[in-house]
Image (spheres, rainbow, N blue to C red):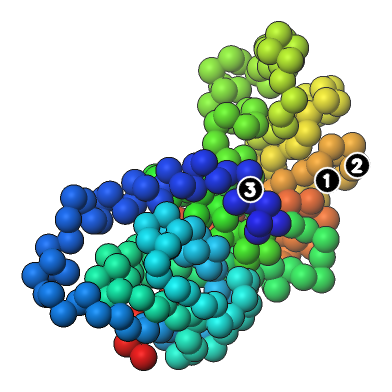
Amino acid sequence: MNSDFYKKYNLEIHKFIDNAINEDLGEVDHSNMTLSQLNSKVTFGIYSKEPCVIAGLQLTEKIIERQNNFIKFKFLVKEGSIIGANKKILTLEGNISNILSIERLIINCMQRMSGIATLTRYLLKKISHTQCKIMDTRKTTPNFRYPEKWAVLIGGGYNHRMGLFDSIMIKDTHIDACGSISKVLEKTKKYIISKDLKIPVIVEARNINEIKNCLKFDWIDRILLDNMNVRQIKHALKLINNKIKTEASGNITSKNIVKIAETGVDYISIGALTHSYKSVDFSMKVI
């Protein structure tokens, strides 16, 4: 799944890498240019100062390939593996100035992606006795969405929609603006047919009446149970009766995720995966 993500979004990932390199490096690295001795070759090691699920190795490879193919690298752990504190993750060998020009970008990406993967794996472990799947949301860092969602996959989770372009999601704001779920879905069906679209349709439901209206449209892919407690979710699932896939979302934390997963809901989407994770502390040292 990790490799599939890169194959699917390689153009977007390389655009991200180019923008990130330009943001940091600009036209010239003056710090390296002032020190002529940095033309020598050396080997660096990148270490994790704390336990984590490692993520970002394949992105690191693509950053190096994009910027400087003369840098040799060796991964000492596997993507998605659990590592302990003070573990050496990879080595970089080559011209000192070449390595230092992309060191910060590599570490920035890996420490954030590993933080997301670690949080995702932690939550998945808590509900591993259920069939429920954990998904991310669009609550991502602008211009860093692809690495963040990639990290969720590495951690064992699933991606919701990537953006507004690859799914139709009917939210409470759409419903309130149009007057009812029925009106929105009638318009949605016409639009899908006119454009010959083959993308998922997800509908937020805030109460039982909205769920009943959703069930009139059996072509919906998923009903999102918005900000419902355990009792309400159980009631909703009984009414839906496996006719349409279900997703619980809103105010879900590590404290209540187990009880929500145990209701039998198919998916739980958590914005905190990509907006409230803790980055892992990484460092680079000369070997």
Using the image as rendered, state which of residue 15 and residue 125 is in the foreground: 15
Between disc 3 and disc 1, the foreground one is 3
The structure residue drawn at horizontal position 61% and vertical position 71%, both measured from the top left corner, is 79
**Lower position in the chain sequence, tag 3 or tag 1:** 3
Check disc 3 and report the residue beneath it. Answer: 7
Using the image as rendered, state which of residue 125 and residue 241 is in the foreground: 125
The structure residue drawn at horizontal position 29% and vertical position 68%, both measured from the top left corner, is 98
Q: Amino acid at mark 1?
A: Leu
**Residue 228 vertical position relative to residue 107 in the rendered view, above or below:** above
**Lower position in the chain sequence, tag 2 or tag 3:** 3
Tell me the crowding category of disc 1: few under 14, some 14 to 19, or many 20 or more residues within 10 angstroms, Cα based. Answer: many
Using the image as rendered, state which of residue 50 and residue 107 is in the foreground: 107
Check disc 1 and report the residue beneath it. Answer: 237
* Residue 152 showing in the rendered view: yes
Query: Residue 179 is drawn in which quadrant?
Result: top right
Instruction: Give the alpha-carbon distance from disc 1 to disc 2, as whole Å.
Output: 6 Å
* Rendering coords of residue 286 (x, y %): 32, 87
Tell me whether the residue at label 1 lies in contact with that at label 2, contact meaning CB atoms closer than 8 angstroms: yes
**Residue 171 vertical position relative to residue 252 in the rendered view, above or below:** above
**Residue 170 vertical position relative to residue 144 in the rendered view, above or below:** above
Assign the N terminus to one quadrant of the image.
bottom right
Q: Amino acid at mark 2?
A: Asn
Q: Left or right: where does residue 223 sit relative to residue 94?
A: right
Instruction: Give the alpha-carbon distance from disc 2 to disc 3, as whole Å.
Output: 37 Å
The disc placed on residue 241 is 2
